[in-house]
Amino acid sequence: MYTVNDLYDLTHTYPAFAEYLKGFTYPWEALGGISEMILKIGETLSLDEFDHPSEDVWIAKDAKVFATAYIGGPCIIGHNTEVRQCAFIRGSALVGENCVVGNSTELKNVVLFDNVQVPHYNYVGDSILGYKAHMGAGSITSNVKSDKLLVVIKNGDEQVETGRKKVGAMLGDRVEVGCNSVLNPGTVIGRDTNVYPTSCVRGVIPENSIYKDQGNIVIKKK
């Protein structure tokens, strides 16, 4: 329940990135190639549709970017996306269509599928957020363990080695993360799951569930 196919509808991202992601079993395996993919996609974008304001940065002409936002390359901002005041995009960010990157939100080595919202004071690093995923105000992805060891994805007794020091969160399509929550390194949240505000989340959380706390995860009623 934490493979690429389990988490993401690949029709809601850039086609070239979708093809790239299909080459992996687990989404975190794709983190190392995000920058290269952005550069490849950028070279194919029409200058009739995208501005190219600085090296390795492409911004859709119908996107709204506030003057106080910082956008470093490589980066692509998709159609009808809004990048609000004081957003800090450090680079290696592939942002889809109809997204919101909010005030004082920081992005680094991330992919936001279409219609993702990170609208208020979020940090999202080394993460992939699926279609219509939403992170409430102040919620963040923690991408480095305090002991600086390699991140391991934990699902009960099962453990998957990532081989990476930096892995944030993999959010499936339509995940809702409550305000002021922390997603610990290697968190994976399945499609259509809701996380209560002020949660401290780690490991693999099933799809279509409600995360109340670490020992209280319930499946949604149909």
Image (cartoon, rainbow, N blue to C red):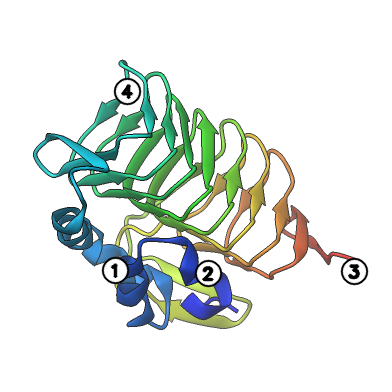
Residue 71 screen position, x and y as percent: 25, 32
- Marks 1 and 3 sit apart, C-alpha to C-alpha, by 35 Å
Dot 2, how many residues are within 10 Å of its Cα: few (below 14), some (14-19), or many (20+)? Answer: many
Q: Quadrant of the C terminus?
A: bottom right
Which comes sooner in the sequence, label 1 or label 3?
Answer: 1
| Disc ID at residue 195 | none
Residue bearing the label numbered 3? 222
Secondary structure under badge 1? helix
Badge 4 element: loop
User: Eyeballing the image, is 120 above or below 45?
Assistant: above
**Mark 4 is on which residue type?**
Ala
Which circle marks residue 8 in the picture? Answer: 2
Q: Helix or strand or loop: what does disc 3 sit on?
A: loop
At 30% from the left edge and 61% from the top edge, which residue is drawn?
Answer: 165
Residue found 36% across the figure and 45% down from its top: 78
Which quadrant holds residue 123?
A: top left
